[in-house]
Amino acid sequence: MVSFIDKLKNSIKTKESNLCVGIDIDKKQFASNVTLEELKDYSFAVVDATRDFAAAYKPNLAFFEEWGSKGFVWLEELIKEIGNQHIIIADAKRGDIGNSAAHYANAFFKHFDCDAITVNPYMGEETIKPFSIDSSRGVYVLCVTSNSSAEYIQNDTFRNVINLTNDMNENKNIGLVVGATIYTK
C-alpha cells in the first residue's frame, strides 16, 4: 500500500507542480437560469484545462450537496473525470463524534475514493482519528481559516490544534489548513 504522503509527493513530482485546483462551482456566479448540466460541463472544463498542471483537485462539497442526490451523482462523475492520476481532496470540513466520523471516512475514502479530506477538529481527537487510521489516505485539519469572524476562537486555539495533530500524526498523513487571507479593521 502506497502512503498518502508518497502519493502526494509523486503527483507533485509527476506534474512538476504544487497546484491544487479548488472546485467551488457557485451557481450565483452564472446566469440566473443556469442548469445543473451547465455547471457540470463547466466543472469538467476546469479539470480538462488544468489536468496537465494540477497535482491535486479539491472539490468543495457544499456546492455539490446543495443539489441533493443529483449533486452527489455530479461529484461521482467529476471524481471519475479527474481520475486516479491526481490527488483528490474532499473539501468537506467534517467534524463529528467518533462513530459518525468513521461513517464519513467510509463515505469519502471508500465510496467516493477520495485521497484526502478536510476536517474540523473542534470536537476533539475522535473527530480526526477515523480519517487518519489508513496511512494511504490524508486528512487536512482546519487550524486557521480565513473567516474574519472566527478570529476570536482561532487565535487562542490554533496552537492546540497544531499540538493535537502533531501528537496524532503517527502515519504521517495529517496536514493543516491555514488560511492566508488578511482582514483589516
Image (cartoon, rainbow, N blue to C red):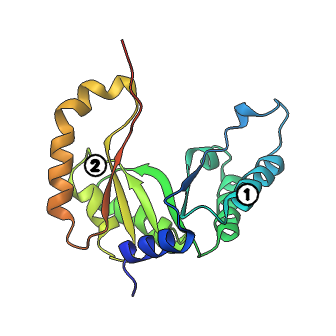
Q: Quadrant of residue 1?
A: bottom left
> 85 above or below 119?
below
Of 109 and 12, the residue lying toward us: 12
User: Where in the figure is residue 75, as x and y percent of width and height?
Assistant: 65, 59
Structural crowding at the residue carrying mark 1, measured as other residues with C-alpha within 10 Å and reported as few (<14), some (14–19) or many (≥20): few
Residue 138 point in image, percent of width and height: 38, 66
Q: Which residue is mark 1?
A: 49
Toward the front, the furthest residue is 16
**Label 2 environment density (alpha carbons within 10 Å; few <14, some 14–19, many ≥20):** many
Q: Up-down: is 181 above or below 95?
A: above
Q: Which residue is mark 2?
A: 121
Horizontally, residue 126 falls left or right of residue 3, namely left
> What quarter of the picture does the C terminus occupy?
top left
Residue 145 against residue 109 in the figure, above or below: above
Disc 2 secondary structure class: loop
Q: Amino acid at mark 1?
A: Ala
**Residue 36 image position (x, y, % from top left):** 79, 47
Residue 162 against residue 101 in the figure, above or below: above
Specify whether 181 is left or right of 175: right
Residue found at the far bottom of this picture: 1
Name the residue rendered at 54%, 74% in the picture.
14
Front-most of 125 and 48?
48
Q: Earlier in the sequence, mark 1 or mark 2?
A: 1
- Amino acid of disc 2: Pro
Mark 1 vs mark 2: in front: 1
- SS at mark 1? helix
Q: Quadrant of residue 135?
A: bottom left
Q: Residue at x 68, y 53 (%)?
A: 71
Left or right, 54 with respect to 156, comes to right
Give the residue displayed 74% in from the left and 61% down from the top: 48
Residue at the top extreme of this rendering: 185
Give x and y (percent) for residue 22: 57, 50
